[in-house]
Amino acid sequence: MPKREAPRCPAPRIRYREALARDAGDQAEVFHHAVMQGASAHYTRPQRDAWVSALPRDASAWAARQALYTTLVAECDGRCVGFLELEPHAGRIVTLYVWPSLARRGIGSTLLIHAERLLIERGVSRASIEASLMLAMGLERRGWRDLGHEYVERNGERLSRHRLEKSLVALQT
């Protein structure tokens, strides 16, 4: 599979929107690089290999996921550089990934804000997520409550994660 170059967004102009079928290939690459590079300080190479093997690095698989989940993307120069998958009826954030070189610039936080707003608009009062070790601390700083530590198995590797939840409150303006 051809490798995609890292997105170039020195002073990124990020646009947030719902995913389109054309985003699926970029989603596959964002997921792969976020896990393999972005999670390297928290998970071993075998753990990261097992994690990425759980979802194909193939656009058609990610396009199929768009039919299962409400998918929000962060777009820079016409390319998806981050995304969040959501089950609105359950108030569950399924995934949140950002291209590693663009991490810590507020892209993931902004995707979460949009997801929380969407859930509130649908009458959901509580959101939940099973977060990786690298994501959990940032979520706690954003008002999420840690419900505990758990393990998930991927291809024979145990991956540590945290279950978190957040009460959603609509603000009066």
Image (tube, rainbow, N blue to C red):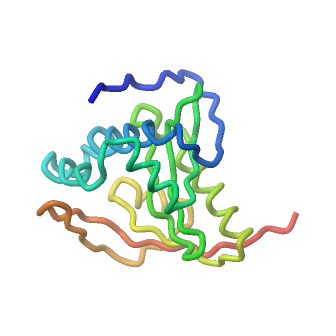
- The image quarter in which residue 30 lies: top left
- Residue visible at 42% across and 49% down in the picture: 62
- The image quarter in which residue 15 lies: top right
- Left or right relative to 43: residue 136: right
- Left or right relative to 137: residue 18: right
- Numbered circles on residues, count: 0
Q: Is 5 placed above or below 147 here?
A: above
- Residue visible at 59% across and 23% down in the picture: 11
Counting from the top left corner in percent of width and height, residue 80 is at: 52, 36
Q: Is 93 placed above or below 98 here?
A: below
Foreground: 147 or 67?
67
- Left or right relative to 124: residue 155: left
Foreground: 82 or 164?
82
- Residue visible at 41% across and 61% down in the picture: 136
Counting from the top left corner in percent of width and height, residue 25 is at: 43, 37
Q: Is 78 placed above or below 104 here?
A: above
Q: Quadrant of the C terminus?
A: bottom right
- Residue visible at 76% across and 70% down in the picture: 170
Foreground: 60 or 126?
60
Counting from the top left corner in percent of width and height, residue 141 is at: 51, 60
Q: Quadrant of the N terminus?
A: top left
Counting from the top left corner in percent of width and height, residue 67 is at: 52, 58
